[in-house]
């Protein structure tokens, strides 16, 4: 169209329509060096979840899952520990978290790898390393002692996983500390006003302690001349007497009003060793400040609760800490979730947009790692509260059903430790199923004589995952997932 | 063309064979992609009856619709309709899952 024939010709200065006047000025265009110039935010199309990951997990699942016709002659996929599968091979290896985590190299710190490793620590059968009894059918250990040992072994497994998981963040914090401030060379050197905030070995020791690297923390303290501190650090996570002693030392310092003259790092280490995780009156001593939820949870696990506390106790301790702190302590949001941005948007926008989350679950996404810990800590919790596809996804509008479905299969179908809340119980046909109680295989033949009913949530989860695979062009994988749909005539 | 969202998937009280219907619907939607290699995987590894695969190939809804109405869809239109069908399926499943009570 000719410029002269445009209705805007001769009216370029008419500012009553800014869109007309400045439309071309603020259009999206290409700048020098291939830079995309734009005035607003670029909308990135939803990237599909990793098809390669789904393929790898489903291939592993298929290799451990027999497919046999059910009573109606329709093929049905039975995960391994499902003994009611007709003609199921008894030699099928177990399809547990450990078998899935072995698919990932040890250097792989992806979300899926971490999730399977955590599941292995929390739910897989665990070796109690008990001495063998003199006779095969007898045991020298009473059930109470056995349960106590199982609790401690399980907690040790979680501690090991958490230590490995937060290690990269420890290194990152140490690098940030080294680059942000000048190190103080001597333990006797005090912070001066001319050199703002020099960090000392006690600061580094504290960072190591937040990742449960007690040996490194003690080494770095002793190398820098903090011999008494190193001695105390080596007893980190000690008994109640040790904590009471550290606490009394802090009170003495407070009573003598010498706290302002003590290094910030030393105060934080003492506070941590005393198990005081909540913020006190001294603003310098906030041991949970600038730590993500995993490290705060670790502080509760390693220093806040006694050695004999269970994972459920640690979980309650962390929940209480978060609740009492307001928004000061890190909440377990998924990695993609920008807490400050979400809070700002919630405060600024009162009018719902088309992209508003349609369900309350979407408003409070939770880190899937934390959801798994919560599932272990609360035996009454059903999978309906935990398997939120938003948490497992890559963003608020990027659902990922793959990990949800695999978690459901392992926890519900294979290990039978937890299920959806809407599964019906049928009692028409007696059929005993083995269960994993606290990681141990048990056959509750007398108690569980009912055939499991249908779960709409489970079928919808499978259908959703199959739709995702279909959209990714993975037809055979989608069919395999649909083979797990339980609803069958009769 | 029918959107292939089976009512069984979102209605838990429907007593029909949900699994069979869901797989057959998926095969029907994906019929153009089912080549010999895929057929071998479906029948060999996944134990899907060959009759289901053949049924999907011959009863793909779009060619039948075109045949009945004598409408000549070009290839792009067919892909577009299939994509919309797939998106609708995915969306309805997601909404139904999220709407379930968390009990």
Image (cartoon, grey):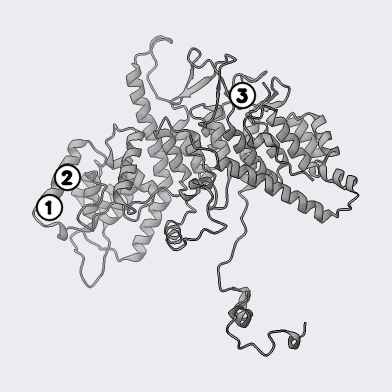
Q: Secondary structure at mark 3?
A: loop
Q: CA distance from mark 2 to mark 1?
A: 10 Å
Height in image: A468 above or below A177? above
Q: Residue under circle 2?
A: A247
Q: Are there few (<14), some (14-19), or many (20+) residues within 10 Å of tag 2?
A: some
- Is B79 placed above or below A450 here? below
Q: Quadrant of residue A189?
A: bottom left
Residue A253: numbered disc: 1
C-alpha gap between disc 1 and disc 3: 63 Å
Tell which of A159 and A198 is nearer to you. Answer: A159
Question: Does residue A210 appear left or right of residue B8 in this picture?
Answer: left
SS for dot 2: helix
Locate residue B78 relative to residue A136 in the image: left or right. Answer: right
Q: Disc 3: which chain?
A: A
Dot 1, crowdedness within 10 Å: few (<14), some or many (≥20)? some
Q: Position of residue A72 (x, y in %)?
A: 72, 21
- Rendered residue at 48%/15% (across/down): A447
Which sits earlier in the primary sequence, circle 3 or circle 2? 3
In the rendered image, is residue A113 in sight?
yes
**Residue that mark 3 sits on:** A92
Q: Residues within 10 Å of mark 3 (few under 14, many from 20)?
A: some
Judge by depth and name the residue closer to the eye, B65 or A251.
Answer: B65
Q: Secondary structure at mark 1?
A: helix
The numbered mark at residue A268 is none
- Upstream in the sequence, badge 2 or badge 1? 2
Q: Position of residue A86 (x, y in %)?
A: 66, 18
Depth check, front residue: A172 or A470: A470
Cβ atoms at labels 3 and 2 below 8 Å apart:
no
Q: Residue furthest bottom?
A: A10
């Amino acid at each position: 169209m000719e410029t002269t024939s445009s209705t805007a010709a001769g009216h370029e200065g008419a500012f009553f329509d800014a869109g007309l006047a400045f439309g071309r000025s603020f259009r999206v265009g290409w700048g020098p060096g291939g830079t995309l110039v734009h005035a607003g935010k670029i909308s990135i199309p939803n990237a599909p979840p990793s098809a390669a990951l789904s393929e790898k997990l489903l291939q592993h699942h298929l290799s451990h899952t027999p497919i046999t016709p059910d009573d109606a002659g329709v093929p049905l996929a039975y995960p391994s520990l499902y003994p009611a599968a007709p003609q199921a091979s008894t030699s099928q290896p177990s399809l547990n978290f450990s078998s899935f985590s072995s698919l990932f190299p040890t250097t792989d710190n992806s979300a899926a790898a971490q999730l399977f490793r955590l599941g292995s620590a929390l739910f897989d059968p665990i070796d109690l390393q008990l001495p063998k009894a003199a006779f095969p059918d007898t045991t020298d250990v009473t059930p109470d002692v056995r349960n106590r040992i199982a609790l401690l072994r399980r907690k040790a497994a979680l501690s090991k996983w958490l230590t490995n998981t937060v290690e990269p963040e420890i290194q990152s914090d140490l690098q940030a500390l080294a680059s942000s401030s000048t190190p103080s060379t001597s333990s006797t050197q005090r912070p001066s006003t001319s050199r703002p905030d020099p960090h000392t070995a006690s600061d580094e020791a504290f960072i190591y302690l937040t990742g449960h690297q007690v040996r490194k923390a003690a080494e770095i303290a002793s190398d820098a001349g903090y011999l008494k501190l190193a001695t105390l650090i080596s007893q980190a996570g000690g008994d109640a007497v040790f904590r009471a002693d550290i606490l009394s030392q802090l009170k003495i310092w407070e009573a003598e009003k010498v706290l302002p003259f003590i290094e910030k790092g030393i105060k934080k280490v003492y506070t941590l060793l005393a198990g005081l995780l909540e913020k006190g009156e001294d603003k310098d001593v906030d041991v949970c400040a600038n730590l993500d939820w995993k490290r705060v949870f670790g502080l509760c696990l390693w220093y806040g609760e006694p050695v004999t506390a269970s994972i459920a106790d640690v979980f309650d301790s962390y929940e209480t800490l978060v609740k009492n702190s307001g928004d000061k302590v890190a909440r377990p949001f998924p990695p993609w979730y920008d807490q400050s941005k979400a809070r700002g948007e919630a405060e600024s926008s009162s009018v719902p947009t088309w992209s508003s989350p349609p369900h309350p679950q979407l408003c409070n996404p939770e880190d899937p790692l934390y959801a798994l810990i919560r599932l272990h800590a609360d035996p009454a919790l059903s999978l309906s509260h935990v398997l939120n596809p938003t948490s497992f996804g890559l963003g608020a509008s990027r659902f990922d059903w793959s990990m949800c479905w695999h978690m459901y299969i392992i926890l519900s179908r294979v290990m039978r430790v937890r299920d959806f809340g809407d599964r019906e119980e049928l009692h028409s046909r007696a059929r005993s199923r083995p269960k994993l109680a606290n990681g141990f295989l048990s056959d509750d033949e007398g108690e569980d004589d009912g055939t499991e009913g249908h779960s709409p949530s489970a079928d919808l989860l499978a259908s959703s995952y199959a739709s995702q695979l279909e959209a990714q062009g993975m037809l055979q994988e989608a069919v395999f997932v649909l083979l797990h749909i339980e609803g069958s005539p009769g | 063309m029918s959107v292939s969202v089976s009512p069984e998937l979102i209605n838990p009280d429907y007593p029909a064979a949900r699994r069979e219907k869901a797989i057959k619907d998926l095969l029907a939607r994906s019929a153009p992609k089912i080549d010999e290699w895929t057929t071998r995987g479906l029948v060999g590894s996944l134990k899907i009856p060959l009759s289901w695969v053949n049924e999907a190939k011959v009863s793909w809804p779009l060619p039948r619709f075109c045949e009945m109405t004598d409408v000549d869809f070009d290839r792009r239109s067919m892909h577009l309709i299939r994509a919309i069908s797939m998106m609708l399926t995915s969306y309805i499943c997601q909404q139904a899952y999220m709407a379930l009570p968390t009990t």
